[in-house]
Image: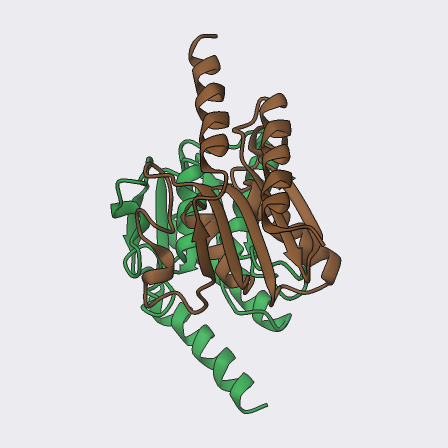
Chain colours: A green, B brown
Amino acid sequence: MPVGNDFMGLALTEAEAAAARGEVPIGAVVVIDGTVIASAGNRTREMADPTAHAEILALREACRKLGSERLPGAHLYVTLEPCAMCAAAISFARVERLYYGAADPKGGGVDHGGRFYDQPTCHHRPDVYSGFSESRSAELLRSFFSEKRSD
Amino acid sequence: MPVGNDFMGLALTEAEAAAARGEVPIGAVVVIDGTVIASAGNRTREMADPTAHAEILALREACRKLGSERLPGAHLYVTLEPCAMCAAAISFARVERLYYGAADPKGGGVDHGGRFYDQPTCHHRPDVYSGFSESRSAELLRSFFSEKRSD
């Protein structure tokens, strides 16, 4: 059975693929009982959809596959701290554990901003583990935006 | 040209249609330059998708129609205060004005909980107007949950 870092490795591969498509390089993987159910990278530009973040696409794919709007027992691996939109979607899907790579002080919604899981309006809080492969996750984003600026 | 209350009326019609489908009765309408671009009611159960809130579906439809992940100048009418997920999606889509009906102290993310638009992690804040048709919006929800409890 793959260990956690392999799942984060797969999320990083999704992030790299997103960068290659010209999308902000963030990737996410949904795992249940040690099996990858869904994985995705950002596709907001390609899909012309502001909600097409990696986490949302992976959650929606997993729900579609399981025919359920809830994923109890699911673990979500994502390369960057989820934003408020994704943090709430992760809660609504009843994800059990959230593993994220780099922190996002500018746009994060878990440990920054509105800290959704700490609010009384949050009715399911996943266990949160952070700092996995954070340097590689952050470097992917840095080099992506650095290249964009020099275009 | 229809006035604001007509757009909220259409959102309420979407909410009623959602209730008839057994979904939480919330409806949303996207308007640009006085024209309805998209409207939707909740479909989380039918679609087995925890992100299929009325606002998300309406925003995604509007973006698909316009071929853009941003909707500058758009006005969004929704019967209930958006949750954190929807509040962030509305910001990402660059919606200009948000009109909502009833406040949602238990699950709202605009004037309750993490108050997304008041956070430094929010990079576009729509103008927010609330209290439109709030009694009808709230009554729809009350009777829906009251009927569910008595099932």
From the viewer's side, name the closer residue of B91 and B44: B91
For the point 66% across and 62% down, which residue is it? A48
Q: Where does residue B147 sit, x and y in percent of width and height?
A: 48, 13
Residue furthest to the bottom in view is A150
For the N terminus of chain A, give its image quadrant: top left
For the point 42% across and 45% down, which residue is it? B83
Q: Where does residue A96 sit, x and y in percent of width and height?
A: 36, 37
Residue furthest to the top in view is B151
For the point 54% across and 91% down, which residue is it? A150
Snapshot quadrant of residue B20: top right
For the C terminus of chain A, give its image quadrant: bottom right
Residue A2 shows in this picture:
no
Residue A144 shows in this picture:
yes
From the viewer's side, name the closer residue of B130 and A67: B130
Query: Residue B128, relative to residue B68: is it above or below?
Result: above
For the point 63% across and 52% down, which residue is it? B30
Q: Where does residue A76 sit, x and y in percent of width and height?
A: 42, 46
Query: Residue B105, relative to residue A128: is it above or below?
Result: above
Relative horizontal placement of residue A14, taking residue A33 as reference (left or right)? right
